[in-house]
Amino acid sequence: MKVKPSGKKINIITLGCSKNVYDSENLMGQLAYNGYDVTHNADSGDIVIINTCGFIHDAKQESIDTILAAIKDKEAGYIEKVYVTGCLSERYKDVLPVEIPEVDQYFGTHDMISLLKTFNVDYKHELIGERQLTTPEHYAYLKISEGCDRSCSFCAIPLIRGKHISRSIESLVLEAEKLAAKGVKELILIAQDLTFYGLDIYGERRLNDLLKALVKVEGIEWIRLHYAFPTGFPEEVIETIAREDKICKYLDMPLQHINNDILQSMRRGHTRQKTEDLIKKLRQQVPNVAIRTTLIVGYPGETEAKFEELKQWVAETKFDRLGVFTYSHEENTHAGKLVDDVPDDIKQQRVEEIMSLQEQISFEKNQTKIGNIYKCLFDKKEGNFYVGRTEYDSPEVDNEVKVDASKFHIEPGKFIDIKITDAEAFDLYGEPVKN
């Protein structure tokens, strides 16, 4: 139930990806340091700041719907002011103030300093690592760079976030140390492209050096890699993943498609053969690696035959984790000049076919885990279960390990060895191993 404004409370609503979560947490840290009562995705607040997503059509619609709902609450007197920041307001900075003038002020993706000044707050660089975490306190996202220099035809991120800008190894290690001091045990490295890290400030790819520095941070037990572009993948990183116990044997590598014509039109910079060679090398050098990927179906020119090639490849490759998106026709992108020639119902049907196939693959892989023991990090208690993850699973998007809360007690944030007793397509069930 909503209440009338009664204090200096700011509610930040975050939409979109983990990179937006990271930005919101930094904003919350700056405001909290200056005495503001800051909440995240709450039901009330005197002032609402909406951190929007503008990546694809559905995300844009969700952002617009959230803005309109906040304006309605403002008109009803539940909210004093509504501010909008993030990707949507960056991408449509000239349109939104005209179309939705009821918003008090719009800010882009690089306007945090201006946003803070609205609250009479100066940005403090010394607050690195002093974010106000919105994740459970035992894991945190660590954004190692901003923007992207790739030119993928379907992607509007470079238009929104700008060119690739790496953070220094020293600043990232300092932030990791501060997070560890707060009790963070798992770092999830994020960027538009992890593999590009360092090229802009060091003149060479330095992801491997960053990993070697982060594994030395005391208190951090897991380091997880998200969003690794396959083209130009620094192969020394594979050796480090295999060698370092702290680095999860897990890699999120969005591949998007496998048909060579589609890959060329997407401007991905790799072919089917190069993709398969990289996957083979990963699996050879890190035998137990879990590879997560995302695919796009319904891209312009994706005929039934090209989709069947993709589907057959998924069946043969047997990814550990997989997600599928329908192609979204975005203005001012290279693919936006092409004819969006795959009907929406066919796009959705193709998503369902791929995910049905992946569900069976996941079920078969999970069945082989019954009887095995895995080190699991537990995130929460939900209903009748404690919910945790193996090193092969990222929070929110991957498989979960569930333990019956009526039989066992587990403290969230702890690592526990779990013996798997049963398995479904996307859930594992188990019991703590007695020491």
Image: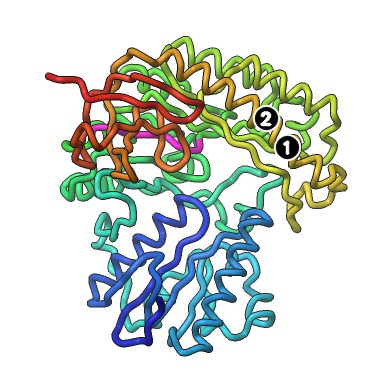
The image quadrant that residue 190 belongs to is: top left
The answer to whether residue 279 is above or below residue 428 is above
- Residue 433 in the image, given as x and y percentages of width and height: 20, 20
Does the magenta-highlighted stretch encompass residue 259? no
The image quadrant that residue 122 belongs to is: bottom left
Q: Which-is-in-front pick, marks 2 and 1?
A: 2
Name the side, left or right, on which 247 lies relative to 393. left
- Residue 298 in the image, given as x and y percentages of width and height: 77, 39
- Residue 241 in the image, given as x and y percentages of width and height: 37, 22
Residue appearing at x 65%, y 56% in the figure: 58
| Residue bearing mark 1 | 297
Residue appearing at x 29%, y 65% in the figure: 29
Any mark on residue 397, and which?
Answer: none
The magenta stretch is: 221-227
Q: Secondary structure at mark 2?
A: helix
Asked if the residue at tag 1 contacts the one at tag 2, i.e. Cβ–Cβ closer than 8 Å, the answer is yes
Residue type at numbered disc 1: Val
Q: Nearer the viewer, residue 78 or 242?
A: 78
| Residue bearing mark 2 | 354
Q: Nearer the viewer, residue 82 or 227?
A: 82
Name the side, left or right, on which 201 lies relative to 211. right
Residue type at numbered disc 2: Ile
Residue appearing at x 43%, y 43% in the figure: 396
In which quadrant will I find the C terminus?
top left
Does the magenta-highlighted stretch encompass residue 226? yes
